Each structure stands twice: as structure tokens, then as C-alpha cells.
Image (cartoon, helix red, strand yellow):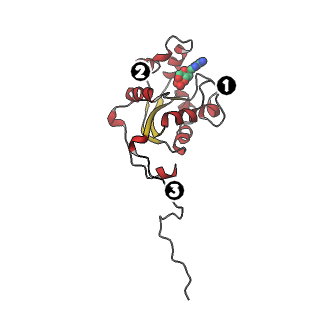
Amino acid sequence: MNDIKPEKKPGKSSAKKPDKKPLAKNSAERTLVLLKPGVLQRRIAGEVLGRFEKKGLKIIALKMLTMDRAMTEKHYAEHRGKDFYGKLIEYTLSGPVIALVLSGKEAVGLVRRLSGLTDLHESQPGTIRGDFAASTRLNIVHASDSSESAGREIALFFKTDEICEWEDGNSGWF
Ligand code: CMP
């Protein structure tokens, strides 16, 4: 009797995909992230982007740019007048940044948690700032603090046609 089992067809995984419906399109939130100039200098861009990707967030827009003064001042308008404002602007202008839009369920809060707290002394190990930042000003990433700020910040960095929504075949895993 022949008890040899038929070979599995290539490309078919034995892992059963979780029985979760993909995110309905309108339940995804968008948020803006900036990888600040020190990230490229320190060659950690891939590692920082990987933190967001591994959590299941979708990159739907990404570009590298050197911000000009007008754009930087607009982006950080709420901090004008604070004692760190001048140095923050100079640091942001000191080299290229990587700007990206992430999409996912409750993306604004999730990205803020992954990023960690702004204050160097409060950012927890395991977060991006907790693991990589050695200064509050040079704190690796900027992340929108509300969905309203996200809308404004995304519009400052990206034109509508630079945002690429894509069908997420993996959403059931996250
Ligand atoms: P970000 O999330 O980009 O938003 C404002 C930025 O200002 C913040 O990250 C820090 O880079 C910087 N910042 C905020 N508070 C301080 C501070 N107390 N001292 C120096 N820089 C600060």
C-alpha cells in the first residue's frame, strides 16, 4: 500500500491564517512621522522604520527631503516662543529628514506609544526614543499628537497624489 503523503503545493503555508476580517477601510487612521536629521547621520533609518512596520502599520507615503525654514517654522508653530524653539529649528534644518505617513487602526496613539515620551528621562526602554535618543531635542522622531494635527501635518509634507493606499493582504495577522 502506498502511504506516501502527497507533496504540498509550493507557496501554500501550513499556518492557518487568523480568522479576522481585514480592517474596513474607514477604520484606519493616518499619522505623520518624521525621522529627524540625526537618524540618517546615525544610519538607523531602517531600524526605526522597522519598528513601525513590524507592529503592522502600513507605510502609505514616504520621502526624503531637506526642509526649508518656512516649512519648519510652520510645522513647529505651536512651539514658537519656547526656550528650545531656536535650537529645534536649527536642528531640523541641519540635514535631510525622512517623512512618512503611516496608516492603521488607532495609528496616532499607537505611533506615539511606539515612539516613547519626548522627555529623555521619561522615555522607556523598548520605545524608539527610549532605545535611541540621548537628548530630548535630538529625539529621533516626530509623530503627530492627534488626528487633527496628523491631517494638518500630512498636508504640509505630502500632496494627495503622493499617498499610495494599497490593499493589505496581511491585515489578519496584526
Ligand atoms: P517633536 O515631537 O518633534 O516636537 C517638538 C520637539 O521639540 C520635540 O520633539 C523635541 O525635539 C523638542 N523639545 C520638546 N521639549 C524640549 C525640551 N524641553 N528641550 C529641548 N527640546 C525639546
* Badge 2 or badge 3: first in the primary sequence: 3
Q: Residue 4: horizontal and vertical position, in percent?
A: 55, 81
**Who is closer to the viewer here, 17 or 96?**
17
167 left or right of 86 in image? left
Rendering coords of residue 53 (x, y %): 51, 43
Toward the bottom, the furthest residue is: 1
In this rendering, would 149 be left or right of 45?
left
Residue at disc 1, CB closer than 8 Å to ligand 1 = no
What residue is shown at x 51% (from left), y 77% (from top)? 6
Helix, strand or loop at disc 3? loop
Under tag 1, what secondary structure?
loop
Q: Is residue 115 above or below residue 79?
A: below
In what quadrant of the picture does the N terminus appear? bottom right
x then y, percent, for residue 69: 43, 18
Q: Look at the numbered disc 3 and say if its residue's Cβ is closer than 8 Å to ligand 1.
A: no
Q: Mark 3 points at which residue?
A: 18
Residue 28: tell me if it is visible.
Answer: yes
| Crowd rating for badge 2 (residues with CA inside 10 Å; few <14, some 14–19, many 20+) | some
Helix, strand or loop at disc 2? helix
Q: Nearer the viewer, mark 1 or mark 3?
A: 3
Mark 2 Cβ inside 8 Å of ligand 1: no
Say which amino acid is labelled 2.
Met
Label 3 Cα neighbours within 10 Å, binned few <14 / some 14-19 / many ≥20? few
The residue carrying mark 2 is: 71
Which amino acid type is marked by label 3?
A: Pro
Q: Which of marks 2 and 1 is in front?
A: 1
Q: Which of marks 2 and 1 is nearer the N terminus?
A: 2
The image shows residue 36 at horizontal and vertical percentages of: 52, 28
Q: Kindly identify the residue that appears in the image at 37 percent across and 37 percent down.
A: 163
Residue corresponding to mark 1: 121
Real-space Cα separation, disc 2 to disc 1, in angstroms: 29 Å
**Residue at the left extreme, as displayed:** 161
